[in-house]
Structures are given as C-alpha cells and as structure tokens.
Image: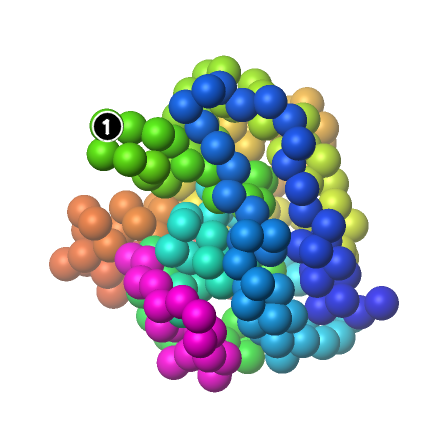
Amino acid sequence: MNFAEKVINFNGNLKYSGKLPKEFQVLNPYLDHPETMDVMQKFYRKYYNDSGQRKFILGINPGRNGAGTTGIPFTDTKRLKSECGIEMKSARTHEISSVFVYEMIAAFGGAEKFYKEFYINSPFPLAILRYTKNGWLNANYYDDRQLFEAVKPFMKESLKKHIALGLDVSQVFVLGKKNADFISKLNKEENFFDKIAVLEHPRYIQQYKSKEKDLYIDKYISVLKT
C-alpha cells in the first residue's frame, strides 16, 4: 500500500466516539459530506501516489471551511480547484489560512514539489465546533481544559497512526505557538518526535501580520528546508 492509499484508509476510518463537554461537537466531513471522500482521494492519489517518506507539518485541528469541507488540511474549495486542479461541485468555501499556505507552497516551488516532501495534518484530525450565542463556531482542541482532556487519548492514537504512514520523525513542524506547547507535552509523554520546530499559524499571519506576509513565507521556507 503506497502513501496515498494509507492516508485514504486512515481518513476513511476516522471516527470520534469519545465524550465531549456539552457545548462542543465534532464534525467528520468524511461521514457528513458525500463528495469529501471523492475529492480527498483524488488529491492524495495525485500528490502522494508513491512510497516516499515525508516531513510532518502539524496544524491544530481542521477548520469548517478548510479540511472540514474538503478533507484536505489547509485547503479550501477555491485553492483545491485553482492550485490542485480538483473541483468540488457541492460546496464552495474560503478559508484565510488556505490563502497563506498556498502562497507559501507556490513560493516553495508548487504543489507537486511541496507535497512530494511534506505531509500536513493535525493532532486532532477532525473539525471541532463550539456552540455560542452566535451559533456553532470553529473551536481548537486546546480552547477548553475539559475538551483537551477528553480528546487527548484520540490525539495520541491519531499521531501514532500518522507516523505509521511513513513520516520522518526526526523533526516535526508545528503551526501555532500554543499548539506547540500542547504538542510538546504530548511528545514528552510519548516521544513521538526528536525535535519540534515552531512556526506562526497561517491564520495568525493572515489576520494580524498580513503586511509582513512575504517575510513569513520566507521564514516558512527557510525553516522547512532545515
């Protein structure tokens, strides 16, 4: 089984059945959106149809408009079509993190070159929503202590399964400083990775540092090539 089929198998069997604090829920796009499985399979068979080892980039958990719809980390439907040539007909989404990631990928040399070297996912690989007075909004696994403790065993198991795909564990690239704090704690318990490199999260860059985006793209490429 090559890298693509391992990822497809992992995603196809994703299911969270643990308890959650009452205001949270998990969104599983592979079960909730019929076209997600189809476009996800096309993506991985296009870019990962080999048995090469990849470096691991870790986000937080999928956003509703990115992997929460397409099944592909940091990839909304716009970038899926324009940058990867894969159209999702039943949904149209825009995620600001996806904008930065694909500008960085373009600067790196394009999707084919980038995905030949890197695999992106999250310690909690399904979207998390929190009910607020404004309705259901995206949430991070670390937003609530009880939430983190509830999903922690699933996160550890997911990381073990990711690594088993054929990933380089000498160094992991973690997006987001708070995310890195939690990954460091898990790493101390499980010894997943030899080193952790920390990069600013794409959403933070787009939202607060957009005027310096080119500098962050250069930083990403410099760190990822170490």
Magenta segment, which residues?
78-96
Residue at 72% over, 35% down: 157
- Name the one closer to the observer, 172 or 164: 164
Instruction: Report the amino acid beneath label 1.
Output: Lys
Residue at 56% over, 19% down: 149
Question: Circle 1 is placed at which residue position?
Answer: 133
- Name the one closer to the observer, 115 or 127: 127
Q: Is residue 87 above or below residue 90?
A: below
Position of 167 compared to 203: left or right? Answer: right
Quadrant in the picture for residue 17: top right
Residue at 54% over, 23% down: 20
Can residue 95 be spotted in the picture? Answer: yes
Could you tell me what secondary structure mostly forms the magenta stretch? loop
Can residue 73 be spotted in the picture? Answer: no
- Name the one closer to the observer, 119 or 214: 119
Image position, residue 126 (x, y; %): 55, 44
> Is residue 80 magenta-colored?
yes
Image position, residue 30 (x, y; %): 60, 55
Q: Is residue 145 above or below residue 30?
A: above
Q: Is residue 156 above or below residue 82?
A: above
At mark 1, the secondary structure is loop
> Is residue 111 magenta-colored?
no
Position of 210 compared to 201: left or right? Answer: left
Image position, residue 86 (x, y; %): 50, 79
Q: Residue furthest left?
A: 211
Q: Residue furthest right?
A: 1
Residue at 24% over, 60% down: 213
- Name the one closer to the observer, 15 or 99: 15
Position of 96 compared to 157: left or right? Answer: left
Image position, residue 95 (x, y; %): 32, 58
Image quadrant holding the N terminus, namely bottom right
Report crowding for label 1: few under 14, some 14 to 19, many 20 or more residues within 10 A (C-alpha). few
